[in-house]
Image: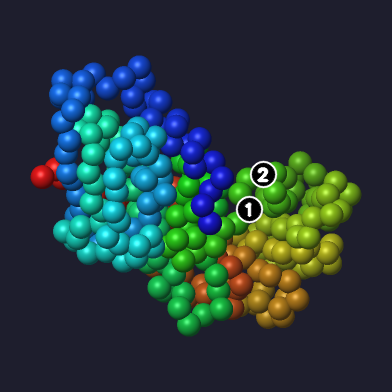
Amino acid sequence: MIPEDLIDVVKQALREDLGSGDLTAALIPEAQTLQARIISREPGILCGQPYATATFAAVSEQLKLHWEVAEGSAVTADQVLCQLEGPARALLSAERCALNFLQTLSGTATAVYHFVVLLKGSRTRLLDTRKTIPGLRQAQKYAVRVGGGHNHRLGLFDGILIKENHIAACGGITAALSAARSLAPALTRTEIEVENLEQLEEALVAGADMILLDNFGLESLRQAVQRVAGKIPLEASGNMGIHNIAAVAATGVDFISVGSLTRNLQSLDLSLRYF
């Protein structure tokens, strides 16, 4: 589950923060050591341990960490998540980058978890989108998995999703699907977006492998599910939120994609305290 670009992402975060060196940490005697705790200030799902651990290790191999809570666990307010000990300069220099990763990814995993809870008892799976923070695509998709969701395609290179503008540029749904089959016949699944039941019918006739139902009302979703009858997967998208995800799932769609999982980010409130 650990993203392959983790070390590169951590190095980049440290480069932009430390630059040529931590001027403030240099005020502290080099031999001084400190002990610290990472504490949650609100309930949520803990995510980002591999990133925080790699951040501290990149600054100093002498830093020792002991996680009190497993990755993906629910945490409460004022709970101790991690114990740290080591050179004071290194702890202070790595603190902000490590917390940035933990707070951002825990916030993502927590948002996902709230949606997943509402889908319990249904057959519908929650998907993320490409609406991620630049440079943190794999990290946020990792957090989606930790929170209980599922990943859509990673980028534009590992799957075909024909959307409204692609359809217009290709000259229609049938033409777009024909072009996709010619371009990438080895792909196991080509998905196309439709905006109404008439377009759904055209996509079915043209041989779509998966269909995204964009901004369909509940009744239209039910009709689409009935028409397809399980022959290919259906994904619902557009204006999906806590307020309606359970009702959308009840229509019988296979997937619901939610852009706000990674776009409308609210970091989990965590802090690092020395003692």
In the picture of the structure, the residue carrying the numbered disc 1 is 153
Query: Horizontal placement of 212 versus 241: left or right?
Result: right
| Residue placed furthest toward the right | 182
Disc 2 residue type (three-letter): Leu
Q: Position of residue 90 (x, y in %)?
A: 27, 32
Q: Nearer the viewer, residue 3 or 132?
A: 3
Q: Is residue 54 above or below residue 249?
A: above
Residue at x-position 22% and y-position 64%: 76
Spatial CA span between label 1 and label 2: 8 Å
Query: Horizontal placement of 240 versus 171: left or right?
Result: left
Query: Horizontal placement of 233 versus 43: left or right?
Result: right
Residue 41, image quadrant: bottom left
Within-10-Å neighbours for mark 1: few <14, some 14–19, many 20+:
some
Q: Position of residue 114 (x, y in %)?
A: 37, 66
Residue at x-position 40% and y-position 42%: 54
Whether residues under marks 1 and 2 lie with C-beta atoms below 8 angstroms apart, the answer is yes
Q: Is residue 4 visible?
A: yes
In the picture of the structure, the residue carrying the numbered disc 2 is 156
Q: What colour scheme governs how the chains and residues are painted in the rendered image of this protein?
A: rainbow
Residue at x-position 60% and y-position 73%: 253
